[in-house]
Image (cartoon, rainbow, N blue to C red):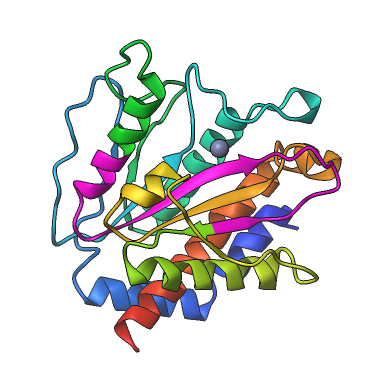
Amino acid sequence: MKPPIIRFIALFLSASLLFALSVVALSGQMDSVYSAIVTEESPPVKAQDDIFTVIVDAGHGGEDGGAQGLYGTCEKDLNLAVALKTAKLLTDCGVRVILTRDGDYMLGDGKKGTKKLSDLRARVDIANGQKNALLISIHMNKFPLSYCKGVQIFYSPNDGRSLEFANVLHSAVKEHLEPEKTRALKEATSAIYLLDRVRIPAVLIECGFLSNEEEAKRLTDDDCQYRFAALILCALSEYLTEERNP
Ligand SMILES: [Zn+2]
């Protein structure tokens, strides 16, 4: 008997997914399987215009821990865990992936007083440096009312394809994770710097509330983190298929 997560991923790797990936492969976008990771020391990743790229952004990092949740959960760590699993799964399926960070650090020049802004600007620069790309930023939520829970997806207002990807990701969440009640999509305002400044299709997913007992526990679980990676893969296959077969 396979463990639940393997069965879950197998479910996603259905005929439609294989079909979608084959469409992409046939279109020549997967002829070069390549995954790049941006680290503090790395030079900027050069755009490879002809290769479709998914930029997986683990929110926060280093001094910026993000939300501090119940049971000692720290948002930056969970964001990174989901981002690494997503990058691995997409890369295994032949998608070119760029991780904005692959460890516990901030991006940017690190100058005192402007560290946070510099970090966000660096993420925007990575995204805008790629022409044929899609950005998915991974975060966790927190709210004073502990009963608040659920996935929340934001999309960038700057490229119509952001809403298209947000829609398929929302459908995947509704179908496979939260069939009862799913939070409505939201267009990002200027309060979400990254989505406000990027020019490529971009979404931000808050995978759950670290202030909610049930979700704070669940989000630290490997199976749950793999589930988000699988949902992103599922949505990506749908998005790429729709894009080529309007
Ligand atoms: Zn966050």
Judge by depth and name the residue closer to the eye, 92 or 191.
Answer: 191
- In the rendered image, the residue lying farthest to the top is 112
Q: Position of residue 154 (x, y in %)?
A: 52, 57
Q: Position of residue 6 (x, y in %)?
A: 64, 56
What is the quadrant of the N terminus in the image? bottom right
Q: Residue at x 22, y 61 (%)?
A: 132
Q: Is residue 174 above or below residue 135?
A: below
In which quadrant of this rendering is ligand 1 seen?
Answer: top right
Horizontally, is 185 left or right of 16 in the view? right
Q: Residue at x 49, y 80 (%)?
A: 16
Q: Residue at x 49, y 16 (%)?
A: 63
- In the rendered image, the residue lying farthest to the bottom is 246
What is the quadrant of the C terminus in the image? bottom left
Q: Is residue 98 above or below residue 174?
A: above
Q: Position of residue 210 (x, y in %)?
A: 73, 37
Judge by depth and name the residue closer to the eye, 155 or 54.
Answer: 155
Q: Position of residue 92 (x, y in %)?
A: 40, 53
Horizontally, is 97 left or right of 185 in the view? left
Q: Is residue 171 above or below residue 57?
A: below
Horizontally, is 145 left or right of 127 in the view? right
Q: Is residue 178 above or below residue 26?
A: above
Horizontally, is 50 left or right of 117 in the view? left
Q: Which residues are magenta?
A: 124-153
Judge by depth and name the residue closer to the eye, 177 or 184.
Answer: 184
Q: Residue at x 78, y 44 (%)?
A: 215
Q: Is residue 133 magenta?
A: yes
Q: Is residue 112 magenta?
A: no
